[in-house]
Amino acid sequence: MSDVILEIGTEEIPAIYMENILVDIRQLVRTSLEESRIQYKEIKVYGTPRRLVLYISHISDKQEDIFKKIKGPAYSIAYTSGSKPQTPAIKFAQSQGVNVEDLIVEDSDKGRYIFALKSEKGKSSLELLTKTFPEIIRSISFPKSMRWEDKKLKFIRPIRWILALYDKKVIEFSLDGLNSGNETYGHRLLAPNKIKISTPNEYFEKLKKNYVIVDQELREKRIRRQIKQIIKEIKGQEIINERQLKEIVYLVEYPNAILGTFNREYLKLPLEVLTTVMEKHQKYFPVYKNKNTLLPSFIVVINNSKKYSSIIKKGNENVLKARLE
């Protein structure tokens, strides 16, 4: 049993499409493995703005062997009364690649028939994945697709790299001139260099050290925890736009929530105007005093380190001021 990882590195994927994309990938992989007779323990799919990741745990080393019993002609025309094989039996055996002596006879409600017993040895999972992974990538459905450079492949955004590992081995394939390998990239700004991955098991920890939290559930928990802490510190009411939170999870790879403020004079504007500007236009989280009143504060989730928070905070405060004036 081995683990398998496939990472499709891309330009930024629109967050609103991500959850449906991940569902589609999971279904495509499940169907492919079942049709290929490959056993596995679990399929997990992850998404960030710059990568789609598939992780298959405890995959079998080869597909299951299969045994077939293929029905042939009626015994009465295949054999003489003395059980000597005739032309129909001989041709049937040849067509199935078995010796005529290995044919068997079985009775049924419709009479006696001859059968050929055949076995098919399973191929290695590694060999099969080199063929199925490109097919899966091409089969992912998107609301909108694009071509780039001189590529024939259509995808939601340009593919820049492909990491594919079966334990320590690269699952080798080429997708429209782009070869799979054992390298990935960290955060675009904080760790843009190549990262070599030796086994699927080390992938997540290496990415984390390079400022990428691959698991969307972990990113969501991190964002939620930080937002709650900020609201508590400024004595606000814990009101979080869940729909917006779901979207922001797929806008960031290394989320950090920071607090911004604005002039109290803007609180004279209608609540709906303020929340629309902050949520829909800027992807901020307004901070509520109560369900009908705001504090002169907002929370922005950045895709960066907190050591840059002061300059990012100032920039976002200026943008909000310009929108409200």
Image (spheres, helix red, strand yellow):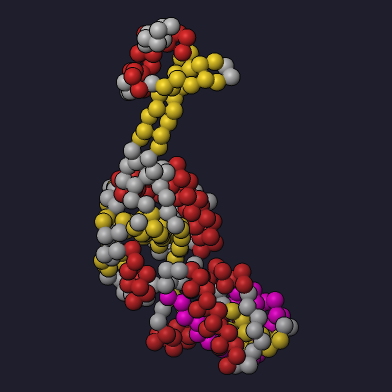
Residue 297 appears anywhere in the view = no
The quarter of the picture where the N terminus appears is bottom left
Residue extending farthest to the top is: 81
State whether residue 250 is above or below residue 130.
Answer: below
Q: Residue at x 52, y 83 (%)?
A: 226
Residue 14 appears anywhere in the view = yes
Q: Residue at x 35, y 22 (%)?
A: 102
Q: Residue at x 32, y 42 (%)?
A: 123
Q: Residue 13 is drawn in which quadrant?
A: bottom left
Q: Residue at x 50, y 85 (%)?
A: 258
Q: Position of residue 54 (x, y in %)?
A: 41, 58
Pick whichever, 50 or 170, lies toward us.
Answer: 170
Q: Which residues are magenta?
A: 254-282
Pick whichever, 235 or 90, lies toward us.
Answer: 90
State whether residue 24 is above or below residue 258.
Answer: above
Is residue 272 inside the magenta stretch?
yes
Is residue 279 inside the magenta stretch?
yes
Residue extending farthest to the front is: 82
Does residue 297 appear to the left or right of 213 in the view shown? right
Pick whichever, 154 or 8, lies toward us.
Answer: 8
State whether residue 1 is above or below residue 298.
Answer: above
Q: How many tags in the picture?
A: 0
Q: Residue 283 is drawn in which quadrant?
A: bottom right
Residue extending farthest to the right is: 292
The quarter of the picture where the C terminus appears is bottom right
Q: Residue 290 is drawn in which quadrant?
A: bottom right
Q: Position of residue 287 (x, y in %)?
A: 62, 84
Q: Position of residue 130 (x, y in %)?
A: 32, 47
